[in-house]
């Protein structure tokens, strides 16, 4: 992650830079709004920390021009604590607003929160060690070898993945995978679970039997 720190006070830039580096972030700096715009035009950043009261071009004016160039998550860092200033920032589209004096640790927490919101999770591919399920490609691979399972086994596996570490009853599995109008019984689930486990090979034990309930896909971090 690369952070652009925009502030006319060198001391503040250094403090933020030090904390960013401790979190493993790369940093770049600008001392005013015009320099920030120039930096954005020639570099890629994951987030901007932006002061408001700066020489040459103030923060909100710079933000407006930056937004026209690239859509970069931005946290305003300002001595202005009036509600009107904050509302203006949020109406313009900034992601967060922190008033000075500020806690560097809180700023780091805010940065992490904004980055988490701005980076979409990829739910199309599930991987766990050597097991990979590509929901778009509708394929399952074990240790880089594609395995062939029935459509119902595949749907079962995907439903387990979407609800990993949650105990699922046989009734839930029947209604969600087979449909509400299916008139089978619990043995249908047990048979397909057995086949799915066999096809998963060394990863068969990821599907746990939950006594008195049903099954769950247990993934340990």
Image: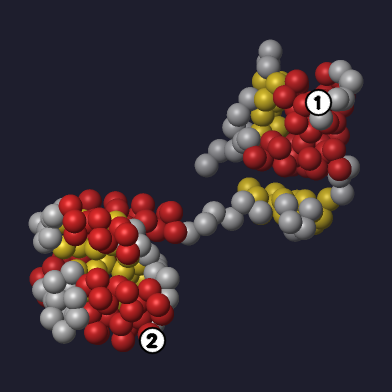
Q: Separation of disc 2 and disc 1 at Cα?
A: 56 Å
Q: Nearer the viewer, residue 140 or 96?
A: 96
Q: Is residue 33 above or below residue 190?
A: below
Q: Please say whether residue 104 is visible from this viewpoint.
A: no
| Residue at 14% across, 76% down | 54
Badge count: 2
Quarter residue 177 falls in: top right
The residue at which mark 1 appears reads as 180
| Residue at 69% across, 13% down | 212
Furthest residue in direction top, as rendered: 212
| Residue at 72% across, 42% down | 158
Q: Position of residue 104 (x, y in %)?
A: 19, 56
SS for callout 2 = helix
Quarter holding the N terminus is: bottom left
The residue at which mark 2 appears reads as 42
Q: Position of residue 183 (x, y in %)?
A: 89, 20
């Amino acid at each position: 992650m690369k952070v652009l720190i925009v502030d006319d006070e060198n001391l503040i830039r250094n403090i933020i830079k030090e904390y960013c580096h401790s979190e493993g972030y790369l940093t770049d700096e600008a001392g005013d709004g015009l320099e920030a715009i120039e930096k954005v035009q020639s570099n890629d950043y994951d987030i901007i920390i932006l002061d408001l009261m700066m020489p040459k071009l103030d923060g909100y004016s710079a933000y407006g021009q930056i937004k026209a160039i690239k859509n970069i998550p931005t946290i305003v860092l300002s001595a202005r604590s009036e509600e009107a200033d904050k509302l203006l920032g949020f109406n313009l589209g900034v992601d967060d607003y922190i008033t000075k004096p500020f806690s560097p640790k809180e700023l780091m927490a805010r940065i992490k929160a904004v980055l988490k919101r701005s980076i979409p999770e990829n739910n199309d591919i599930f991987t766990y060690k050597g097991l990979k399920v590509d929901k778009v490609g509708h394929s399952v691979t074990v240790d880089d070898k594609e395995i062939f399972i029935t459509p119902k086994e595949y749907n079962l596996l995907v439903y387990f993945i979407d609800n990993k570490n949650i105990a699922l009853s046989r009734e839930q599995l029947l209604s969600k995978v087979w449909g509400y109008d299916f008139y089978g019984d619990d043995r249908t689930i047990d048979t397909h679970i057995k086949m799915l486990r066999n096809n998963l090979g060394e990863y068969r034990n990821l599907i746990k039997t939950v006594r008195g309930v049903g099954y769950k896909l247990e993934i340990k971090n």
